[in-house]
Amino acid sequence: MWCAAARLPARSCLDFVRVLRAVILAKTQTWDLFSTLDVVDRRSLVRLLDRGGVRDLSHTAKPPTVEEFLRLQRFLNNPEVIGAVLRRLSEDVTR
């Protein structure tokens, strides 16, 4: 719903949130994009990461920080939306 309000494609929002969730979960879990994203095929994972400009994430042993992911990703290109996401995540940490 907020994707439409922000005039962003739903697929881009969904992909953004899926990968962001994986980055956040990697703070407490193993960095395993296949399991976290529920992807069984390497080609599917690569296509997803390519859409967001973060293909290199599939080759790293160490997950990026949330800030690194937000800076690198290309799922969403609206700086206001990215800033809002970062602020919201910061609020959640301080609670």
Image (cartoon, helix red, strand yellow):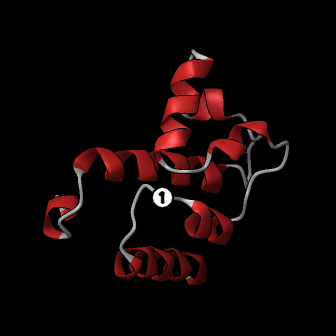
Q: Secondary structure at mark 1?
A: loop
Image point 62% across, 20% down: which residue?
42
Image quadrant where one finds the C terminus: bottom right
Q: Is residue 72 above or below residue 58?
A: below
Q: What residue lies at 22% left-to-right and 60% top-to-bottom? A: 3
User: Does 16 sit left or right of 64 as displayed?
Assistant: left
**Residue 91 in the image: x percent, y percent?**
50, 82
Image quarter where the N terminus lies is bottom left
* Label 1 Cα crowd, 10 Å radius (few <14 / some 14-19 / many 20+): some
Residue type for callout 1: Arg
Residue 8: where, in percent of width, then height? Answer: 23, 60
Q: Which residue occupies the foreground of this view, 68 or 36? A: 68
Q: Which residue is mark 1?
A: 74
Residue 35 visible:
yes
Q: Position of residue 54 (x, y in %)?
A: 61, 49
Residue nearest the observer in this picture, 45 or 92: 45
**At which x and y percent is residue 76?**
39, 62
Q: Is residue 77 above or below residue 26?
A: below
> From where the camera sits, is residue 38 visible?
no
